[in-house]
Image: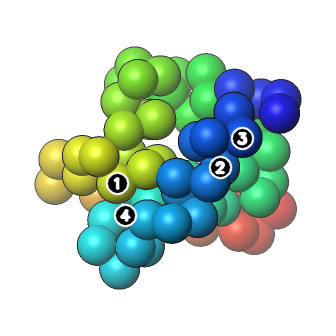
Amino acid sequence: MSHGYTLRLVELNAQADPKMSLGVKLGRVCIKKRVPVQEIASALSVSRQTIYNWFVGGTSPHPDYEIRIANFIDKLSND
């Protein structure tokens, strides 16, 4: 896969429960829109590894990031 998404990452994101984490929701939108992982990491001022962890539900975003993530999802959803 391209844009930093391995097949394994896509599978793990699909299996993760989006009700449990805003990061999983972010992953679903970004994978669908094919937004490069580095672009997401730069926009949210976190590492690529953090993005991967959020996408698969391994960790949840700190509450300080929730508004920024929600805004990022909204922007992508409206493009």
Place residue 20 in its image quadrant. bottom left
Q: With 64 as the anchor, is 78 left or right in this view? A: right
Indicate which label's residue lies in the foreground, 3 or 1: 3
Identify the residue at image location x=80%, y=45%: 34
Q: Nearer the viewer, residue 65 or 8?
A: 8
Q: Are marks 2 and 3 in contact (CB under 8 Å)?
A: yes
Residues at circles 3 and 4 in contact by the CB criterion of under 8 Å: no
Q: Estimate the spatial distance between the alpha carbons at disc 4 and disc 2, rounded to whole Å.
A: 16 Å
Residue flagged by tag 3: what amino acid is it?
Leu
Q: Amino acid at mark 4?
A: Leu
* Left or right of residue 16, residue 13 in this image: right
Instruction: Count residues near mark 3 (Cα–Cα under 10 Å), then give few for <14, some for 14-19, many for 20+.
Output: few
Q: Which residue is mark 2?
A: 10
At numbered mark 2, what does the secondary structure look like: helix, strand or loop? helix
Q: Residues within 10 Å of mark 2 (few under 14, many from 20)?
A: some
Mark 1 burial class by Cα count in 10 Å: few <14, some 14-19, many 20+: many
Please name the residue shown 46% across and 48% down the image.
55
Mark closer to the observer (4, 2): 2
Looking at the rendered structure, the kind of residue marked 2 is Val
Instruction: Say whether disc 3 or disc 4 marks the residue closer to the N-terminus.
Output: 3
Q: Which of the labelled discs sits on residue 22, or is there none?
A: 4
Residue 19, image x and y in percent?
35, 80
Q: Is residue 6 left or right of residue 21?
A: right
- The residue closer to the viewer here, 78 or 30, is 30
On residue 57, the disc is 1
The x, y position of residue 30, in whole percent, is 66, 51
Residue located beneath label 3 in the image: 7
